[in-house]
Image (tube, rainbow, N blue to C red):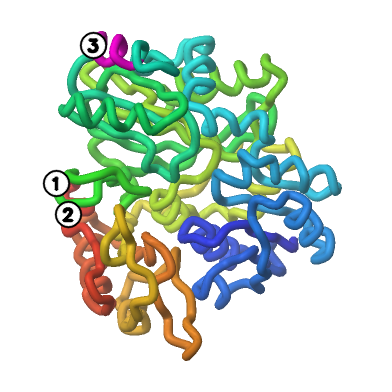
Amino acid sequence: MKILVVGPGGREHAIIKALSRDPEATALHAAPGNPGIAVLAQCHPVDVCDGAAVAALAVELGVDLVVIGPEAPLIAGVADAVRARGVACFGPTEAAARIEGSKAFAKDVMAAAGVPTARSRTCTSTVEVEAALTEFGSPYVVKDDGLAAGKGVIVTDDIDQARAHAAGCDRVVIEEYLAGPEFSAFALCDGSTRSVLLALARDHKRAYDGDLGPNTGGMGAYSPVSWLPAGVEDTLAATVVDPVLAELEKRGTPFSGVLFPGLVLTTDGVKVIEYNARFGDPEIQVVLERLETPLAGLLMACATGTLKSDVALDWSGDTALNIVIASDGYPTDPVAGDTITGLDAAGSVEGAHILHAGTAYNDTGELVAAGGRLLNVVARASTPELARATAYEALAHVELRGKVVRSDIGQDLA
């Protein structure tokens, strides 16, 4: 099976790494890829949001399957363009991807499907914003209705900060605060109401230790999530995944690809914070590290509507943990161009490996920072303590001026 993975980041590197272990994946391509991905796949320069260009590349390469990683091309309809050229595609249609592209649309779907979630108001005026902030009170939760790369949400006790965030958006969703630890689920879906749930993961969104500071795209993750109550996966399928798939099908927008609910364990049970239409980053890095079922066949089954209703996945019992290394100034003003060294030493630590996210080579061939989140240090071990120690041992080898990392990823497993 020839496969083209679309996207430039750590999520796509993790997908390609998993596919590289699968004998069924006979040729791997990436568009555009990154320096780490280039070790495993042939990279091709392309604008990931240009559906015609991505589809043309897929046809030119003669691939059997296109896997779209990031949310922006999905919301731009790139999956539709690929399918229109007769190539199987893992990823939802533009219409179905609205579940991530519009917070207001997602809330409407959740209400119709009876999904447990926070009460909310969609606001387009200052008057509506003020009324909603007063209704739900502090902490104030204000979400940009559109895409914002994981940084369109603000949670604050400062009403002026909440007002300012709302004023910077065309339309916002303001909702009640849901207290409790957060975690992520990923359901592979084939365009019907069939799905299979992957292992659960915990993501750390805040920039600094102790879950402080601004929201980011994610500073680290781990799987499994041992503190969750027994049987939570069955509950999620029945209350969070199946009803939404049925509602989207009812609306004429069946969902194929990854349905990714962000979840919180409250005193009233599990509730949905939001839905996404792709694998989470940095969570999927640890989930795929534990997946022992070959990935290529699963993705193709979803892309072609042939997922078996009784499919069972095999998982390692190990703990996998991912620590994100970000550039100096992240997340507000990341610095590009700083040299990165020590990756060979980091990757030589037993049980650890490095995934690239925002890296590039400069004119002299040095690996440099080329984004905000730069690298993922992933470790897998028989215990949470050993996985955590291994990841931080590997991380210590990476040299980068002003690197931004959290020192407490996985600490809540102890």
Check the image and report above or below for 370 versus 49. below
- Between discs 2 and 3, the one toward the N terminus: 3
Q: Residue 135: x and y, percent?
A: 26, 9
| SS assignment at label 1 | loop
Dot 1 corresponds to which residue?
210
Marks 2 and 1: CB-CB under 8 Å?
yes
Compare residues 339 and 132 and report the one nearer the observer: 132
Compare residues 115 and 169 and report the one nearer the observer: 169
Disc on res. 134: 3
Marks 3 and 1: CB-CB under 8 Å?
no
Q: Residue 172: x and y, percent?
A: 41, 24
Query: What is the total number of numbered labels drawn onto the structure image?
Result: 3
Compare residues 203 and 93 and report the one nearer the observer: 93
Question: In which quadrant of the rendered image does the N terminus lie?
Answer: bottom right
Circle 2 or circle 1, nearest the eye? 1
Q: Residue at x 33, y 62 (%)?
A: 334
Circle 2 or circle 3, nearest the eye? 3
Disc on res. 78: none
| SS assignment at label 3 | helix
Circle 3 or circle 1, nearest the eye? 3
Q: Residue 214: x and y, percent?
A: 25, 44
- Going by the numbered disc 1, the residue's amino acid type is Gly
Q: Residue at x 48, y 41 (%)?
A: 198
Q: Residue furthest bottom?
A: 364
Asked whether residue 308 appears in the rendered view, the answer is no
Magenta region, residue range: 129-136
- Going by the numbered disc 2, the residue's amino acid type is Asp
Q: Residue 302: x and y, percent?
A: 67, 40
Dot 2 corresponds to which residue?
408
Q: Is residue 184 left or right of residue 292?
A: left
| SS assignment at label 2 | loop
